[in-house]
Amino acid sequence: MAPTTNQSSGSAPLTVNPVVQRAVGAQLPSPCTPMSSPPSYGSIVTVLSIDGGGVRGIIPGTILASLEEKLQELDGADARIADYFDVIAGTSTGGLVTAMLTAPNDQGRPLFAAKDINNFYLEHCPKIFPPRSMAGPKYDGKYLHSVVQSLLGDKRVNETITNVVIPTFDIKLLQPITFSRYDAQNDVSKNALLSDVCISTSAAPTYLPGHRFETTDKDGKPREFNLVDGGVAANNPTLLAMTHVSKQILLGNQDFFPIKPADYGKFMILSLGTGTAKIEEKYDAVQSGKWGMINWVYHDGSSPLMDSFSQASADLVDIHASVLFQALRCEKSYLRIQDDELTGDTASVDVSTPENLNRLVEVGKALLNKRACKVNLETGKNEPDMDRKTNEEELENFAKMLSDERKARLQKKASFQNTHKIISRCFVFPMSPVQTPEQSNGSLTLNPVVERVLSRGKSLLSPSTPRSPPPSYGSIVTVLSIDGGGVRGIIPGTILAFLEEKLQELDGAEARLANYFDVIAGTSTGGLVTAMLAAPNGNGDPLFAARDINDFYLEHCPRIFPPASKGPLGLFKSMTGPKYDGRHLHSVVQQLLGDKRVGSTITNIVVPTFDIKLLQPTIFSTYDARKDVSKNALLSDVCISTSAAPTYLPGHRFQTTDKDGEPREFNLVDGGVAANNPTLLAMTHVTKQILLGNHDFFPIKPADYGKFMILSLGTGSAKIEQKFDAVESGRWGVLGWLFNKGATPLIDSFSQASADLVDIHASVLFQALHCEKRYLRIQDDELTGDAASVDVSTPENLQRLVGVGKALLKKQACKVDLETGKNEPDMNRKTNEEELVLFAEMLSRERKARLQKKQGSMKI
C-alpha cells in the first residue's frame, strides 16, 4: 500500500501540512487565544474520544491535564484542549468531561481547563454517589442535576467551542440518539441544553434515573426526549465520532474540504478509557449459569451484566479502530490509553469515598508511565507496543503534532485572508471518482473474466458443486452477517431460503449459500444459522440447505424455550436462575454438529462470544482456528456459547488444548453481549487477515472497503410502541430494568443500540465510498407483541415469524438517512426481494469468474 500523507514510523511525528514548517517557529496563539480553524485549513481531522465510567472519569481527567500542560508549554498558558481537537466525543462521564472542555464562558473560552476536571470530581462525586440504598435506581440524581444545571446554565449544544458528539439512548423510542454541534446547527430540535444532554448521557440504568426533556423544532412544535446512559449505545464513542465526521463530509460540510468521506488515514485520534477491572476471574460459566436476573445485575459488589455489555462494546470499538489504523499503515495516528488492571473499589463506577477518588488520581498518573499499547492482530488482545514509548512520551509527541497542525491552520487562514483568495468560496472541486463505480443498472463492476464467462451461457457448477475459490481469484470479498435474536432467527431464515432459491435458479439445484460467501458471520441465533450453513456433511457439502433452517426452528424452539411458569413462582425462578435450563439446546446442537470443529467449515465463519471469567470478547473464526489450535473448538461448543443469553440460558464452559497440549478453558456467554450485529466484526476480521498476509485476499488491500459486498440480516426489532418513558424508567430498580410489561428493557436496550450503531457505521461507510449497492441491510423494525419476543415459541408465534419474513421481502429496501440517522426506505432501490435477485446475480457472476480464473491458472 502506498503510504498515507500522515504515515509515521518509529517515533517520527505525523507529516502534516507543509505550512507547518513555516509556522512552527511563530507562537501564534496569543494570550487571547484565537478560535481554531477547521480542517479545511489543515491536513488532518483531530478527534478526542472519552469513554464512560462514572467516578473513573478521574483517570482520563488526569491524562487530559497532562496533555494540556504539554500544549501550554508549546503555545502558552491560555492553550486549551478544545483549541486543538476538531471533534471531542464523550459518553456518560466522558460526555460530562466533553461539556466541561468545550462549553464557553463569558469570554468565549472553555469553561474548564483540563487541570480543573479532577477537582470537580473530587468535590462533587461524594454528593452524586452518596452511600445509600433505596427502592428504584441506586441514586436519585438530584445533586447531579443541580450541579450540572448550575455549571452549564442555558448553554446549548451549538454553542460549544469545538464540535462535540455525545451519545444517549431513547428508552421510549428504543433507539440511539446522538447529540452533536453539527446536528444542532442544522436541526433546531437537536439543539438541546448541554445540561440536559449531560444528565441524559450519565443516566446509567439501575444507577441513576432517566431524563425527560423537550425542545422545539423549526416549526415551533415540541420534540420530547426520554433518555438514558450513552453507554448503552457506545461506551467508547471513537467510531461514532469518526462516522459523524464522514457523515458531515458526505453532507457537504466545507469545514472538511478536501478530505474525502472515508479518508481515515487523515484522522488523528486520541481515545481515552476510564479503566477496566483486572482479570481476577471472579466468575465462571458454571457459576453464572446458575444466576437469575438479580445476580446478573448485582453480584459481589459489581454488576456483571452492565460490566459485560460496556466492556465488550468498548473493547470491540478499540479492535475495529486499531486494526483500521494498522491497515492504513498509520498506527501513530491512533493512540488508545486504557488501564485494564483496576482492582477492588477502583474498578467501581460509583465508590466515591475520598480514599478511592484519590486512588483513581494515582491510577491516572501511573498510567502515564506505562508503555503505550495496541491490539495484537494474532490474539486480539491489547498488549504493550514495543514500537512506542510510554503514554506520557506518546502524549508529548501528540501535543507537538496538535500544536504544529493548529499553527499551520492559523497561518494558512491568515495568509488567505490577507490575499482575499479563500479558495473554498470561489471554486467547487468535483470529488474524484471511486475506484469501483456502480454500473447504471445497480450491478457491481466485477472481474473482466465475468463477461467472458457469461457470454458462453453455461454454468460452471456441476452436480457435485466445487468449493468457491478465494477472493484472490475474483474482485470482491463477499460477506453474509446474521444478527442475534432467539426464535426470531426464523426471519433471516426466510430471507436466506429465498436468496438460495434464486442462486439455484441461476446455477443449479446444488447451489448453497456457503459456496458464494467468503465470510459468514453470526451472533447468538445467527451463530447457529451460520454453523448450519457452513458445517460440512459427510460428502463435504453444507449440512443444511437454507430452506431447511426454518423447519429446524419450528421443530426445536418449543423444546428449547418451553412455556415458563407464570405468576409469583415463575418470577421467583427467573430472579434466582436462568429462565431455561438449556438442556435441549445442548443436546440437539451436539447431535447436529457432532465432532465438527471451527476449522472444518466449508467457508470462513466469524462467531462472537463473551468470556465472563476474563471479561472480554472471544471471537471464533475459521481463520483463527487454522492458525491457533486452541481456537479450533467444537462447533457445537461455539454455538451453545454464542446463544447463552444472560438471564435466559446458562453460560457454557469447555476446554481445548493448545499446540503444546496445555488445556485452555473458555467460560462463555451470548455473543450479543459483544456484537449483536456482527457486520463490522466480519469486516475487521477480513482486514486483520489481509494484514497478516493471508494470500486468499491478494491483491485486495487491508482497508479497501469498496471491495466488500455485504448482506446484513437483522432478526427484527420492536415497533416503536412507546411502552416506557424516562419518568417511568426513572423509578425502576433492578427488577424494573430486567422485567417490565413482558420485555427486558436493559438487555433489549443494549442489543438494539449495538445493532443500530453498527448499521449506521456500515451504511455511512458505503455511502462515503459511493458504493451503496454493495451493502444491503434487511431488517424489520415494526414487530409487535409476541413477535418481538426472543423466546415465545408457541406454534402460532413461530408461524407468525415466518409470515414476517415473507412480508419483509416485499418491503422497500432501506438505508440510513444521513440527516436523521434513521433507517428509512431508499427510493433509489427496489423491494428487498428484487434487491436479493440482483444480489444473487452478482454473487453468481463473481463465483463463475473465480472458477474460470482458477481453471485458467491451473492450465498455465
Image (spheres, helix red, strand yellow):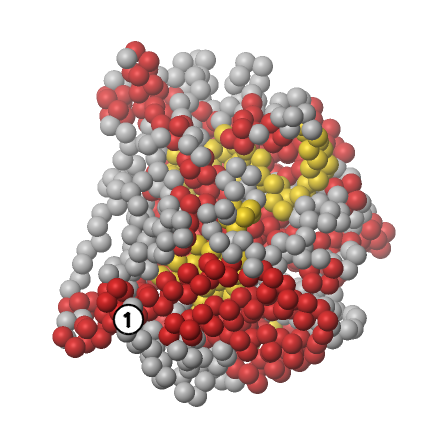
Q: What is the total number of numbered labels drawn onto the structure image?
A: 1
In the depicted structure, whether residue 132 falls above or below residue 237: below
Q: Furthest residue to the top? A: 859
Q: Give me the residue at 42% from left, 45% from top.
A: 326
The residue closer to the viewer here, 766 or 551, is: 766
Q: Where does residue 476 sit, x and y in percent of width and height?
A: 35, 34
Q: Give me the residue at 50% from left, 47% from top.
A: 385
In the depicted structure, whether residue 255 falls above or below residue 533: below
Q: Furthest residue to the right? A: 569
For disc 1, the marked residue is 25
Q: Give me the residue at 51% from left, 74% from top.
A: 114
The answer to whether residue 94 is left or right of residue 555 is left
The residue closer to the viewer here, 393 or 40, is: 393
For the residue marked with disc 1, what is the amino acid? Answer: Gly
Question: Would you say residue 204 is visible in this rendering?
Answer: no
Question: Would you say residue 381 is visible in this rendering?
Answer: yes
The answer to whether residue 700 is left or right of residue 656 is left
Q: Where does residue 338 sit, x and y in percent of width and height?
A: 57, 57
Q: Where does residue 504 sit, x and y in percent of width and height?
A: 42, 23
**Which quadrant is home to the N terminus?**
top left
Q: Furthest residue to the bottom? A: 106
Q: Where does residue 166 sit, x and y in percent of width and height?
A: 50, 67
Q: Helix, strand, or loop for circle 1?
A: loop
Q: How crowded is mark 1: few (under 14 residues within 10 Å), some or many (20 or more)?
A: few
**Quarter of the image where one finds residue 550:** top right
**Which quadrant is home to the C terminus?**
top left
Q: Give me the residue at 26% from left, 64% from top.
A: 21
